[in-house]
Image: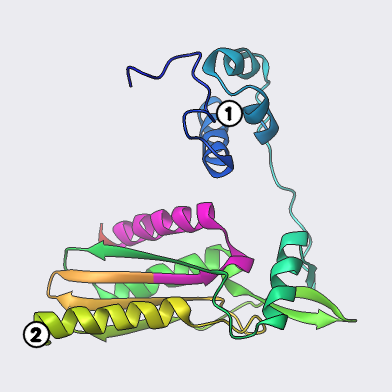
Amino acid sequence: AETIGIESNFFQMGGHSLKAARLMAKIQSYFNIGLSLQEIFKFPTIRQLAPVISTTGTNPITMPNIEEQEYYQVSFQQQRLWNYQQRNPGSDAYNIYGKLSVNEDLQVSEVHETLFQLIHRHESFRTRFGQLKGQPVQYIDTWVAIPLKIIDLSILQEEKKEKKAEKIYKENYQKSFDLASAPLFRVVLIKLEARSWDFIFVMHHIISDGWSHELLMKEFIDFYRGLEV
């Protein structure tokens, strides 16, 4: 902390576009303003950014709602990912994955309910992709099966347990998605001990990104904790 001051350059201190997006979101939320990402890049020090924050009105950036449609256009980034997947249907190159270790008694029914809430809340978890007149489009289903798989390794000896768990991690991280079938994510819950679980979450980059993935993991924990109360 003693090396960081109001003249320190955010990007020279190790900041990058993803961290800048997080910083922008925190500033927007805290000050209730519509700060843009471009302003973070233009004013990378506290001294430069402070006047911008103080003179920006309370006008937070909002995303307009789109009327419900049969299908929706894809973004440029989604089209690029879709084209790649069509050329490489078995590829896992754009799989985003994470693992969360939980040292407590998990209630599988509550994990199931938490995933149900996430799927209902986020349309991306109900999104699949198809072609219309040779161009990719996205469809949002009203309902999808909850992609939860539970594996109990607690009865295995420690060495076998570790090897089996690593095999499961690898298989799920490397398993490709069929973009025409929702959901484009999967969850595996591995029981290692009575109070030791590994939670594996894998999704395709076409419905999320690294920043969103971290937020979703946090949201999963918040929803689950809410069910425990």
Q: Magenta part of the protein: which range?
A: 201-227
Kind of residue sitting beneath label 1: Asn
Give the percent coordinates (x, y) of residue 33: 62, 27
Give the percent coordinates (x, y) of residue 120: 53, 68
Instruction: State yes or no: discs 2 and 1 in contact (Cβ < 8 Å).
Output: no
Look at 32% across and 70% down and name the residue there. Answer: 199
Tally the marks: 2
Front-lying residue, 55 or 200: 200
Q: Earlier in the sequence, mark 2 or mark 1?
A: 1
Q: Horizontally, is 160 left or right of 175 in the view? A: left
Q: Which residue is mark 2?
A: 157
Look at 34% across and 65% down and name the residue there. Answer: 99
State whether residue 212 is above or below residue 20.
below
Q: Secondary structure at mark 1?
A: loop
Q: Which residue is mark 1?
A: 32
Prevailing secondary structure class for the magenta stretch in the rendered image: helix
State whether residue 134 is above or below residue 222.
below
Place residue 89 in its image quadrant. Answer: bottom right
Look at 40% across and 19% down and name the residue there. Answer: 4
Quarter in which the N terminus is drawn: top left
